[in-house]
Amino acid sequence: DNLILRRAQIKEARTSLADLKEEMTSIKAILKQNSARTVQKTNVYLTPTERDVLELLCRGYTNKEIAERRSVSKDRIVKTVKKIMSMTQTKNRTELVRWAFSTGYVSPRRPS
């Protein structure tokens, strides 16, 4: 009896693993399809410092607040933001935030 039950469990486990593998393949395809529509490709490379500044900017921090948080001068942040805007060909902070979200450099936070 135990042998028959154990064989049935093993057979069921194999089926479950095959089903799981098939489901994972489907999920990967859906994720790939969705990300192709939401994230744009970009040739812009940002340094870790530039990424950090961009992240804080996207969270709504002012240049002064970013400078205080990073322990650098406000002028340094202004130069960094201008450099990022030049590389991304954006004209203002709003366009820069949109660019950051659309390229996936920063992910928009959803209210919980």
Image: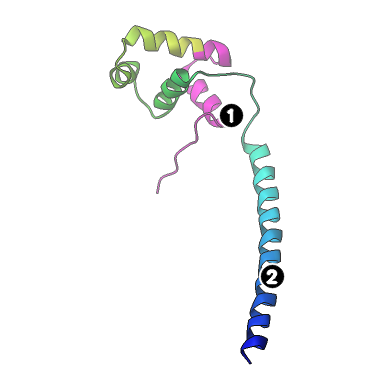
Q: Left or right: where does residue 64 sit relative to residue 33?
A: left
**Amino acid type, label 1:** Thr
Residue placed most toward the observer, 71 or 82: 71
Q: Left or right: where does residue 34 sit relative to residue 65?
A: right
Residue at image position (55%, 25%) is: 99
Residue 9: quarter of image: bottom right
Residue 87 horizontal/vertical position (percent): 56, 13
| Residue numbers of the magenta segment | 84-112
Q: Give the vertical position of 13 relative to 96 (above or below).
A: below
For marks 1 and 2, give the one nearer the viewer.
Answer: 2
Residue 15 forms part of the magenta stretch: no
Residue 47 horizontal/vertical position (percent): 50, 18
Residue 93 forms part of the magenta stretch: yes
Q: Give the vertical position of 39 relative to 9 (above or below).
A: above
Estimate how packed mark 2 is, as few (under 14), some (14 to 19) or many (20 or more) residues with alpha carbons within 10 Å: few
Q: Which residue is mark 1?
A: 103
Q: Give the vertical position of 97 relative to 83 (above or below).
A: below
Q: Secondary structure at mark 2?
A: helix
Q: Which residue is mark 2?
A: 14
